[in-house]
Amino acid sequence: MSNLKQLGAAFLLYCDENEDVFPTGAAASTLGAQPEDWIWWQLGMGFNVGQSPILVAIKASTNSFRCPMDRDDSGRKAVVNAGGQFYGFSYTVNGFADTTALKGAASSYAAPVAGTYTAQKLANIRRPSEKIMLAEEPASAADAPPGSTVFLDDGRWAPPGNVITIRHNKRGNVNFADGHAQSVDYKFASDTNHFDTSF
C-alpha cells in the first residue's frame, strides 16, 4: 500500500503544480502516448517510463508503479494475445466518463469526445475522501474478482467494466482523491458512489 500512498501524494502535487488539473489517463488508444499522461508506458512513442510526470513530481523510481505482490503476468499476456499492448504496472487512474462528461479523476484525450483534450480539475471532485482516484487492477485470473475476465490493459481504470484486484486477502488497494489509501472489497470499488466523482 505504500506505493499507492506515494502515488496519491504525487497526483496531488501534480495538480498543485498544474493549475489544479489532473494528468491524462494514459489510455491505449489510436492517439498514442501524450505528454500529459500520468505514466509513459507505451513503448516506441518517444517517452521514457522513468520520466513519467508522476514519478518526476516525487523523484521516485518505476518500482512505485508495481505492487510487490503483482507477480503473475498471464492476464497481461492475454491482452497482448488479443491485440493489445503490455501494461507492466499495477496501478491505474480513474478514467470513468460517459458521453457527456469526465466523471473520474483523470483528464482525457479519449472522453467525452475522442481526440479532444478535456481537463479534469481536483476542485471538480465531489466528496474526494470517498472517490477512488487510483486503483490496483488484476493482472491474472487468480487475482481477479469472481467472474471477471478483464485485466490491466492501460494506465486508465474505466469502471464499471474494469474492476480492482483481490490479491490482498480478497481485497484491493485504492487511493482516494483526498490522497488517503485504503484496502477495499471489489464490490465497494464497483459502486458508482465510489468512482463517479460528479456527485
Image: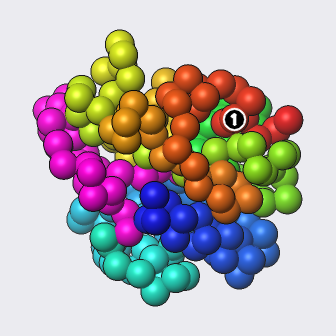
**Element type at marker 1?**
helix
Q: Which residues are magenta?
A: 64-93
Q: Residue at x 24, y 26 (%)?
A: 141
In this view, the residue in front, 194 or 75, is 194
User: Which x, y percent locates residue 23?
Assistant: 60, 63
- Residue type at the position of mark 1: His
Quadrant containing the C terminus is top right
Instruction: Classify residue 153 by image quadrant.
Output: top left
Left or right: residue 121 versus residue 54 is: right
Residue 29 forms part of the magenta stretch? no
User: Which x, y percent locates residue 3?
Assistant: 44, 65
The answer to whether 33 is drawn above or below residue 166 in the figure is below
Left or right: residue 79 versus residue 37 is: left
User: Which x, y percent locates residue 56?
Assistant: 48, 83
Is residue 137 visible to the viewer in this orientation of the structure? no
Residue 70 forms part of the magenta stretch? yes
Q: From the image, tell me which residue sits under label 1.
A: 194
What count of labels does the image hold? 1
